Image (tube, rainbow, N blue to C red):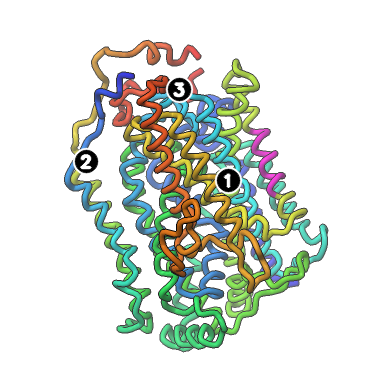
Amino acid sequence: MPSDHKTGLRWSNWNLLLILPLFMLITPWFNFDEPRIFGLPFFYWYQFLFVPLGVACVGIVYVKTKDEPVVTGKPDKLGVDDLDEGAN
Amino acid sequence: MQWTELIVFSALFLLVTVMGFVAARWQKGETLDHLDEWGLGGRKFGSWITWFLVGGDLYTAYTFVAVPALMFGAGALGFYALPYTIILYPLVFLPLVRMWSVSRVHGYVTPADFVKGRYGSHWLALIIAVTGIVATMPYIALQLVGLEAVLRSMGLNGSGILGHLPLFIAFLILALYTYQSGLRAPALIAFVKDILIYLVILVAIIYLPSKFGGWGEIFNDAQAKFDATPSKADGILLTGTNQLQYATLALGSALALFLYPHSLTGILASRGRNVIKRNMVALPAYSLLLGLLALLGFVAISAGTKPIVNQATGRPDTNTIVPELFGANFPSWFAGIAFAAIGIGALVPAAIMSIAAANLWTRNVYKEYVKKDATPAEEAKQAKLASLVVKFGAVAFIVFVDPQFSIDLQLIGGVMILQTLPAVAIALYTRWFHVYGLIAGWVAGMGYGMWLLYNIGNPAVGKAHFAGSALPLGNISIFGWHPFGASTTQIYVGIVALLVNLVVAVIVTLIAKKAKSPNGVDHTDPSDYHVDEDNPRVKPVAAH
């Protein structure tokens, strides 16, 4: 099991932004009628605001982690199973 | 019979039918006799096609009729669809690109292919494949419910078997062009579907509120309706007992969505990692649409819309709320466009789902157990036939079994597919879990989840079992001990079952590791999870 020794994970602190939209699950923060905007109760327009927020978070992570090193090819350390690929 | 609507609907339906058949020649590869081509469209869809395809796949016709229907009936709880589709993308952003890369290197077509490669266990892969097929089947049947709601609103509301004839014809056409064109058919049709849906929703959301006195008035009408009902659980805000249900339902649904095989099909068909990442940024445009659409459930209350009685079952069908609202308040030509949008909206996901189920059957059952030496051409043939079987199975389900049964099954399906999370999603990051742990966790989560769902009744609609997914915390007992006392706070069953699954998986993993039992062979390499489209290590498409 070669992979048990290497994690193969890449981390950027920008990824933490992906947690932010999850805060919209805390319902006691927004389960109110007032104030209304255009007749929409707070409960509804507050949650609509999370659409642009979610887009911004994912967008920032995408842009900021774009130039992480791309693995192109790899040193020849193929296992037997990889070499057999295509044979089955 | 509403002729104008029917003519507009039929014209648009004819257009997508032609597109469905022509799609076989669109961006075609060397051959259609390979699952990479038939089942994944050649693995080369760019950002725009993927956006339409995945959007058309995730936001289904059933969603478009069922979410407003839930708002109409239960109020704020139905709005969970918005947080669900907002938190979805940040949650899956990182795992999905890993899944794409490893699948591209090894030529995986289904999530079960990945599990087999990761754990070297065809039994674990079989469990994942069967879960996927069983969870997808009722989902396809539900698309038919959406389509039929529209057909019945146009006056094609016959009784008995004959009443289902229009549905049967629509599905026969769908089955034929999916058989011929594979994933390219829904990919091309998705353009028409999504453009129509955007058009209809935007017009509806601007025009209808002004007709009924503005949003303030509409919410007041909704509140007045819910105040008048004996139920304390409904209202335009959440209540004390259903807030946890709201949050866990959104979270559980978000975690489950990309475990469904059809969602992954759309992702694996894309060209590269950046296509997926860009889509994770752009797909919430549909969420906005879904949120607005949900509010139409309240508009229907103001408008005094009445669900029509389904002549085949003899009961009022709340899923007809949105079609009825459109039919009564739009000029008939525009209502025809709206109906076509929903109807075509049923065809796209139904096609993708049947392809995904067919891929699972072919790769993880047929090739694994029936014909081990199947050539790629035989695999493609098998998948095409399986897609026909799946679709006619779904039609038979709707025609011969009460549609309510499909809705119940869909509810169960969500809980079921969530149980594949450790083996599919967590395995993308770590192989810490032992294969025995994953199997034991699946059995425990599945068993407990089904048992909990079975015991949820709703006396108000006269159902003793499978009446919903909201579980009062007080009903949870661990061998007779009630950790939450008699609490009436509700939680989504899927999350509870997933927690049980994870706990059992951890315990069995620890035991199996202690006992040093063999844990299969990992055919993937850590660097496989970062490979992009320009990498020489990607497996050639449709290679034999």
Badge 2: chain ID: A
- Quadrant of the image occupied by residue B425: top left
- Chain designation of label 3: B
Mark-to-mark CA distance, 3 and 1: 25 Å
Q: Residue at x 58, y 61 (%)?
A: B456
Residue closer to the observer: B487 or B354: B487
Q: What residue appears at the point 52 percent right and 32 percent down from the top-left corner?
A: B28
Crowd around label 3: few <14 · some 14–19 · many ≥20 (10 Å): some
Quadrant housing residue B308: bottom right
Q: CA–CA distance between discs 3 and 2?
A: 33 Å
What amino acid is at disc 2? Lys
Q: Of the numbered discs in the image, which one, if any, rests on residue B120? A: 3
Residue that appears at 56% across and 74% down: B73
Q: Which residue is mark 2?
A: A66
Name the secondary structure under disc 1: helix
> Can you give x and y, in whole percent of width and height, for residue B174 in the image?
66, 47
Q: Quadrant of the N terminus of chain B?
A: bottom right
Q: Quadrant of residue A68?
A: top left
Range covered by the magenta-colored residues: B384-394
